[in-house]
């Protein structure tokens, strides 16, 4: 059974028991964990824009295209589609019934991954902005995002990735 603590001594208010101060290693480990937790909390605002855009793993076509179900656009005007070959996802945006664009999210300024943010695609590195169709709205980027042709067949949208994306 543990000994009662005296008032005014270490441990009386729930700290370390008298005579049992934490080791430097234990103190630094706790301090590091608190710092990492605070850092993660600070990153949450950066992830808010991503939360509203669904991220899909597409079905591959025999020709290498990417298939996305059209019902993915029922809850959001755009979706991010996994495209490992490019190292960055493709953003597909619905502009209206039967009207879609598919663009690689690699910023044409210095290659950072741009993120959909409302009606724009924004590069977090230097602030370039693109429209949902990939056209430059604000520099420093001077070229539009690489675009991929899309086909609609039944309830499926197919991104034709064999073209490797064309710059407009």
Image (cartoon, helix red, strand yellow):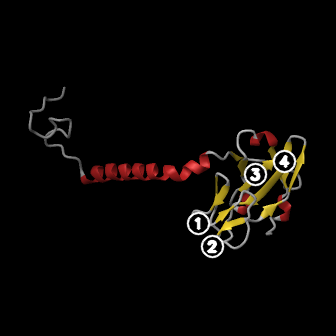
Residue plotted at (75% across, 51% down) = 93
Residue at image coords 37%, 49%: 33
Q: Earlier in the sequence, mark 4 or mark 2?
A: 2
Residue contact at pointers 1 and 2, CB within 8 angstroms: yes
Q: Which residue is mark 2?
A: 140
Mark 4 residue element = strand
- Image coords of residue 20 (percent x, y): 18, 43
Q: Which mark is residue 127?
A: 1
Residue 93 is labelled as 3
The label shown at residue 17 is none
Label 4, on which residue?
157
CA distance for labels 4 and 2? 32 Å
Q: CA distance from mark 4 to mark 3?
A: 11 Å
Q: Does the CB distance between marks 2 and 3 fall below 8 Å? A: no
Separation of residues labelled 1 and 4 (CA atoms): 30 Å
Query: As rendered, which of 108 and 62 lies closer to the eye?
Result: 108
């Amino acid at each position: 059974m543990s000994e009662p603590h005296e008032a005014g001594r270490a441990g009386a208010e729930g700290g370390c028991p008298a005579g049992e101060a934490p080791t430097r290693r234990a103190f630094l480990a706790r301090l590091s964990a608190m710092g990492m937790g605070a850092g993660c909390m600070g990153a949450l605002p950066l992830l808010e824009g991503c939360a509203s855009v669904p991220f899909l793993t597409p079905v591959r076509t025999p020709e290498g295209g990417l298939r996305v179900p059209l019902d993915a656009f029922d809850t959001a005007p755009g979706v991010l589609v996994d495209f490992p070959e490019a190292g960055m996802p493709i953003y597909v945006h619905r502009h209206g019934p039967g009207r879609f664009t598919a663009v690689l999210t690699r910023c044409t300024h210095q290659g950072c991954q741009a993120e959909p943010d409302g009606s724009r695609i924004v590069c977090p590195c230097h602030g370039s902005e693109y429209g949902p169709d990939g056209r430059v709205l604000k520099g420093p980027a001077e070229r539009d995002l690489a675009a991929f042709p899309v086909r609609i067949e039944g309830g499926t949208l197919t991104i034709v990735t064999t073209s490797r994306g064309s710059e407009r």
